[in-house]
């Protein structure tokens, strides 16, 4: 099985690009950091916020994934079509995989650049995917790297000239997709509401009031 066939069968209207929450009726958008600002008054990074974000994303992951679940570890890398010919999967995957042999199983497919941009035709998106299990991944480091996108914190994904890579964790055992877009928030969608309703109830306070009506409509009665 590859990621394209899986999505066509289970999430036929979803493209693995940011804002998956708005592509599917059953989902949750979480706001992270509890309104703690990223910087202190002296302009130093407020590490209290980032520690909280790391804890929140780890909690959400552990509610959605069990160690024996099968998942696709998917990464979108955005690049110039002609200036960057070499793929750079190692910079995204190698630090986060416990077994380096899994690097040889990574699949890749190239797509048009998915965002509106002047001269977008000069760029492209390479989508890498690896079928594995949570126990194969250094999950906490991966979630931290996704959260650290805009700040000089480690770990980080490899630097690219166009945009920071986006990472999606697709649980094919439970039909759930999890995406941390940066330190401000993350998205979860599911094929069946029962799979994520307990998460919504547990982490209800991390959801903005403006999002609750849409979420609860998709999940059914709370």
Image (tube, helix red, strand yellow):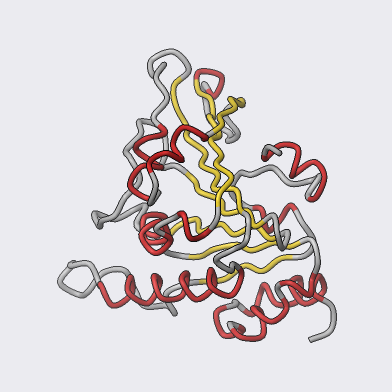
Q: Residue at x 36, y 55 (%)?
A: 145
Image check: 218 left or right of 15? right
Q: Residue at x 52, y 35 (%)?
A: 105
Residue 125: image location, x then y, percent: 54, 30
Give the residue furthest to the left.
42
Q: Residue at x 41, y 16 (%)?
A: 85
- Is 216 located above or below residue 122 in the figure? below
Image check: 116 left or right of 98? right
- Is 32 located above or below residue 16 in the figure? below
Q: Residue at x 74, y 72 (%)?
A: 195
Residue 104: image location, x then y, percent: 46, 32
Image check: 54 left or right of 181? left
Residue 126: image location, x then y, percent: 53, 29
Residue 86: image location, x then y, percent: 39, 19
- Is 115 located above or below residue 157 in the figure? above
Which of the pair 106/86 is nearer the observer?
106
- Is 2 located above or below residue 134 in the figure? above
């Amino acid at each position: 099985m590859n990621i394209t066939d899986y999505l066509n069968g289970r999430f036929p209207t979803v493209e693995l690009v940011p804002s998956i929450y708005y592509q599917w009726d059953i989902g949750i958008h979480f706001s992270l950091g509890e309104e703690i600002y990223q910087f202190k008054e002296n302009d130093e990074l407020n590490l209290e916020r980032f520690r909280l974000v790391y804890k929140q994303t780890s909690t959400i992951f552990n509610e959605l994934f069990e160690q024996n679940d099968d998942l696709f570890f998917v990464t979108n890398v955005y690049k110039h079509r002609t200036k960057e010919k070499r793929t750079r999967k190692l910079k995204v995957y190698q630090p986060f995989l416990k077994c380096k042999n899994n690097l040889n199983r990574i699949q890749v497919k190239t797509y048009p650049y998915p965002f509106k941009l002047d001269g977008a035709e000069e760029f492209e998106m390479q989508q890498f995917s690896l079928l594995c299990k949570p126990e194969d991944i250094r999950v906490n480091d991966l979630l931290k790297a996704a959260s650290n996108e805009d700040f000089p914190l480690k770990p980080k994904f490899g630097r690219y000239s166009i945009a920071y890579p986006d990472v999606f964790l697709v649980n094919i055992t439970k039909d759930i997709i999890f995406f941390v877009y940066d330190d401000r928030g993350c998205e979860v969608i599911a094929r069946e509401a029962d799979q994520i309703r307990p998460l919504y109830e547990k982490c209800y306070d991390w959801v903005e009031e403006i999002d609750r009506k849409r979420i609860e409509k998709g999940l059914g009665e709370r």
